Image: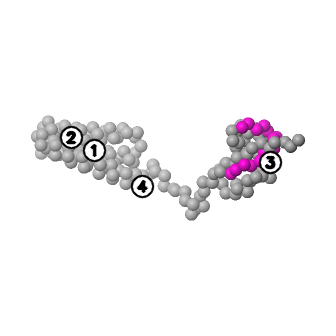
Amino acid sequence: MKLALTVIVLQVLGVAAIIAEFVIPSFGVISVVAAALFVLSVYMVFTEASTQMGYALLLADIFLIPAAIFIGAKVLEHSPVTLKKQLKSEEGATSQKKGLDHFLGLEGEALTDLRPSGVALLGDERIDVVTRGEYIEKGCQVTVLSVTANSVVVKQQIAAD
């Protein structure tokens, strides 16, 4: 009877440790403790009870451990270590600055060296721009080639003779 109680306590502590691993950031230390608790309980049953009981407990652990992991993952959703706030477009969050398309084809001046990124004056606005890889010196005239995602791609204007 004492063995059965010890094994049950070790199993319950192992399940609790797995669930705690999801809530408490321990970098795997609690998982190692949980594994040790499960191994110790199975070892105790194999050595102090019978082989049949050991295999029965091992089979139970095959179902118990994934169930504990599933429960831990569900608990993680409500854990303080997870990000609760989600940025949604319905709330006005965007991943791209709006209004860059109007710079397409516009001419301006490089305010910094573009190697390949820097700042250019396009119209009346200072805009972060990139080149296609070439170096453009400060003060050179540039033309906007394309606008993709959050980048404005420019090229140096060739001076007409």
Residue 94: % across, % down: 60, 57
Left or right, 99 with respect to 8, comes to: right
Depth order, front residue of 148/93 = 148
Q: Which residues are magenta?
A: 134-147
Category of crowding for the residue at label 3, using alpha-carbon neighbours closer than 10 angstroms: few (below 14), some (14–19), many (at least 20): many
Label 2 to label 1, Cα distance in Å?
Answer: 9 Å
Disc 4 residue type (three-letter): His
Label 4 to label 3, Cα distance in Å?
Answer: 51 Å
Query: Which residue is denoted by mark 4 in the rendering?
Result: 78
Residue 141: % across, % down: 81, 44
Residue located farthest toward the bottom when viewing the structure as drawn: 90
Q: Secondary structure at mark 2?
A: helix
Residue 108 is tagged as 3
Q: Residue drawn at (45%, 49%), measured in percent from left and top?
A: 81
Q: Secondary structure at mark 1?
A: helix
Label 2 to label 4, Cα distance in Å?
Answer: 30 Å
